[in-house]
Amino acid sequence: MTAAQTDNSTNGRAAIPAHVPADLVFDFDIYNPPGAAEDFHLALKQLHDPQYPDIFWSPCNGGHWVATRGEDIHRIFADFEHFSSTRLTVPKSNAPPVPLFPIFADPPQHTAYRSLINASFAPKAVAGLEAKARALAVRLVEELKPRGKCDFVVDFAQHLPIEVFMSIVDVPGSDRKQLLEWAEGMVRPKQPGDVHITIGKIFEYAAQKIAERRKSPGDDLITKLTRAEVGGRPLTDPEIVGMVSLILIGGMDTVVTAMSFAALFLARSPEHRRQLVESPKLIPKAVDELLRRFPIVNQGRCVREDMVYKGVSMKAGDMVILPTTLHGLDERAFPDPLKVDFNRPTPMHSTFGNGPHRCPGSNLGRTELKVFMEEWLQRIPDFELQPGGKIEMRSGVNGTLYGLPLQWKVG
């Protein structure tokens, strides 16, 4: 056993099951890897060191398997027949008290619930939201430009994608801060028990919004769910609460972090900024490459039945964690994976998952990243990190970036 983590007071260490051989056991906390506060992605990249097998068992967080290579991560995401989405995080005791559909369901059940939200994130809907995102991006950048500095996370990233998302569900901007705090509590809890406390608050908020829509319907996604049917029957209140809660959590975290990591990279790389300023048509490819290089999600699957996967014996109920970062940074999948190359052929990565559960908001996320780069670089083409400014990262179900102090010349 290799000790990659020495403080085990809060990571729910489990006994090693009888079916797990000793040579596949590595004491690695996937939600809190050493070095994550300095570089979240490189902290996980160390799992590609020769000492780690492609699939290993960690006793942390209740005990689970970890897939470290892109081929397996991509394959397991899509293989719902052997790897179920009814459990997604570890320890399994952190699961919400009711399923958050559609993400906690497998086909064909998943398909029925997923169809209820697809239209809100379809290309036609995203095209309409792009204009809203662009107008907001222009306003935000124009307000920030004369200041010569900002905290990108707080002043830009926590506004652009979130305000666009909030228009989809029609919740007031005054709720943004609270929703951000709850999303943080779900994907990066400070204590294991915090997840249940936080999900209770989100459920209560969702139920309140559902009641409001029933009283005063609108054209938003929450209203549509109150009128939706699945299997020829109306959705139950717990089903609607779960779906609305999932949408709220998902809309508050991932794109904010993806945008912040993209801005951090561009602040550190004037050559790449210059490429995009001189060739704006390259921006869509840049979006794909930055998504490949800086994934953030550590999602899991639950083994359906006893099986052997690539020589590894797995038992029904075992959890397998799939760090999307390890696909994007896998040298077996991408030559020189740590290098950002905007001319790289369009990569097939797992940043948005794979298979039936591929993120429904992926098109919107890509669009928002594209709009950010187009409008920011047009107005602030040269920027850098503020000297001495604090940049902190954290891991969890999702990695994140706290604070990104930037500066640029005015005039």
Image: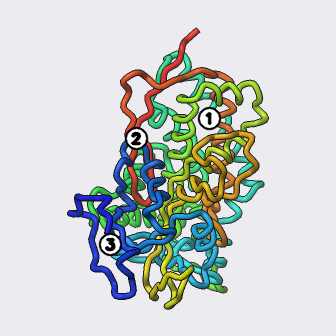
Between the C-alphas of marks 2 and 3, the distance is 28 Å
What amino acid type should be assigned to the residue bearing mark 2?
A: Tyr
Q: Which residue is mark 1?
A: 136
Q: Position of residue 36 (x, y in %)?
A: 38, 48
Q: Which residue is mark 3?
A: 59
Contact? badges 1 and 2 (CB < 8 Å): no
Query: As rendered, which of 47 and 259 lies closer to the eye?
Result: 47
Residue placed farthest to the front in the image?
A: 50
Q: Position of residue 260 (x, y in %)?
A: 52, 40
Does residue 12 lie above or below 46 as drawn?
A: below
Q: Position of residue 378 (x, y in %)?
A: 68, 24
Disc with the residue nearer the chain's start (1 vs 3): 3
What amino acid type should be assigned to the residue bearing mark 1?
A: Leu
Does residue 265 lie above or below 113 as drawn?
A: above
- Label 2 crowd (10 A; few <14 / some 14-19 / many >=20): some
Which residue lies at the image location 59% right of the left edge and 69% below the top edge? Answer: 225
Between the C-alphas of marks 1 and 2, the distance is 22 Å
Residue placed farthest to the bottom in the image?
A: 306
Note whether residue 219 is visible: no
What amino acid type should be assigned to the residue bearing mark 3?
A: Pro
Q: Which residue is mark 2?
A: 402
Note whether residue 263 is visible: yes
Quarter of the image with the C terminus is: top right
- Label 3 crowd (10 A; few <14 / some 14-19 / many >=20): many
The quarter of the displayed image where residue 354 is located: bottom right
Which residue lies at the image location 61% right of the left edge and 60% below the top edge? Answer: 350
Disc with the residue nearer the chain's start (2 vs 3): 3
Quarter of the image with the N terminus is: bottom left
Is residue 35 toward the left or the right of residue 109 in the image? left
Query: As rendered, which of 213 and 383 lies closer to the eye?
Result: 383
Q: Secondary structure at mark 2?
A: strand
